[in-house]
Amino acid sequence: MEIIDDLKWRYATKRYSDEIVKDEILDIILDSIVLTPTSLGLQAYEVLVLDKSSSLRESLLTACSNQPQIKEASHLLFFNAWKSVSTENISEYMNRISLTRGTPLEKLEGFKSNIEKFTGGMSEQDVFSWSSMQTYIALGIAMTTAATLKVDTTPMEGFNRKAVDAIINKDNEKLSCSVILAVGYRDSENDFLSNLAKVRKLKNELISFG
Ligand SMILES: Cc1cc2nc3c(=O)[nH]c(=O)nc-3n(C[C@H](O)[C@H](O)[C@H](O)COP(=O)(O)O)c2cc1C
């Protein structure tokens, strides 16, 4: 199975080479994020892409525990989860459905009020937990897509959220970074992880059939 070989090939890359991921390849990974399913279809997060030349990289380094990927990876993707859902967000979504599917807005009233009821009672923390969980689905799909393209990635939670937000989300209080994905090409010579065997539970330890 090709996909399983790709998933065996990938690993959480620690050290990246200078090779830059071409725009057309990166675009496929970004398309896979756009196609990720989300709760209610609301897509309650945004993704910020920083390339190697970004002046923000230097200040992000300390906010991300000085992890080398922040300096070395070709691109960094910041998954910024919503902390609130506004009535404008919901209306915009209804308009998008209506335009895309030709559904009259009146027919979407029931769905709209369900979303309003569901999100209306949520605290900022509730919304962030809910939306950030969904960013991890996009993260997984992006990593899998990258692996099929022989592009390396690292999912990264080892950062100070407040410090990262102060750098990348300072102009948008609605957003908070849940997870980062480094993207690029492995530096096999300098990455001690590149040749280590995968450590995983046996399938029957992890999965049971009822
Ligand atoms: C949510 C999440 C957060 C992670 N955070 C980091 C991180 O900050 N830095 C890092 O080098 N690796 C990080 N990792 C990588 C894991 O350590 C790695 O995926 C795990 O050890 C399994 O190894 P493999 O991905 O190479 O197969 C993270 C992985 C996940 C899924």
Image: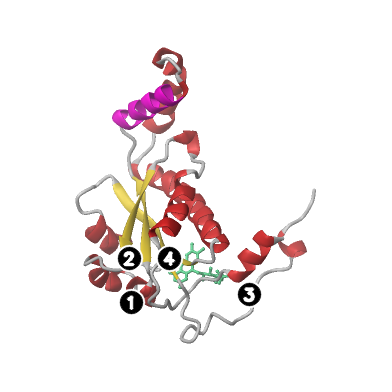
* As drawn, 73 above or below 170: below
Q: Which residue is mark 3?
A: 198
Q: Give the SS element for disc 2.
A: loop
Q: Amino acid at mark 1?
A: Asn
Q: What is the distance, in whole Å, between disc 4 and disc 3 at their CAs?
A: 20 Å
Identify the residue position indicated by label 1 in the image. 66
Q: Secondary structure at mark 1?
A: loop
Callout 3: SS? loop
Q: Main secondary structure of the magenta part?
A: helix
Decide which of tag 2 and tag 1 comes sooner along the chain: 1
Give the label, 1 or 4, closer to the camera: 4
Q: Which residues are magenta?
A: 87-100
Residue for point 60% across, 70% down: 9
The reply to whether callout 3 and callout 1 are in contact (CB within 8 Å) is: no
Q: Is mark 4 within 8 Å of ligand 1?
A: no
Q: Is 36 colored magenta in this rendering?
A: no
Question: Between residues 157 and 42, which one lies in front from this camera angle?
Answer: 42
Residue at (29% x, 29% y) in the render: 88
Q: Which residue position is annotated with label 2?
A: 160
Residue 124 numbered mark, or none: none
- Frontmost of labels 2 and 3 is 3
Mark 2 vs mark 4, foreground winner is: 4
Mark 1, residues whose alpha carbon is within 10 Å: few (<14), some, or many (≥20)?
A: some
Whether residue 75 sits left or right of residue 153 in the image: it is left
Residue at 54% x, 56% y: name it.
145
Q: Position of residue 172 (x, y in %)?
A: 23, 47
Q: Is mark 3 within 8 Å of ligand 1?
A: yes
| Residue 62 occupies quadrant | bottom left
Of the residues under marks 1 and 4, which one precedes in the sequence?
A: 1
Where's residue 21, x and y in %?
A: 41, 65
- Looking at marks 3 and 1 on the same chain, the residue that comes earlier in the sequence is marked by 1
Residue 56 sits above or below residue 145 on the image: below
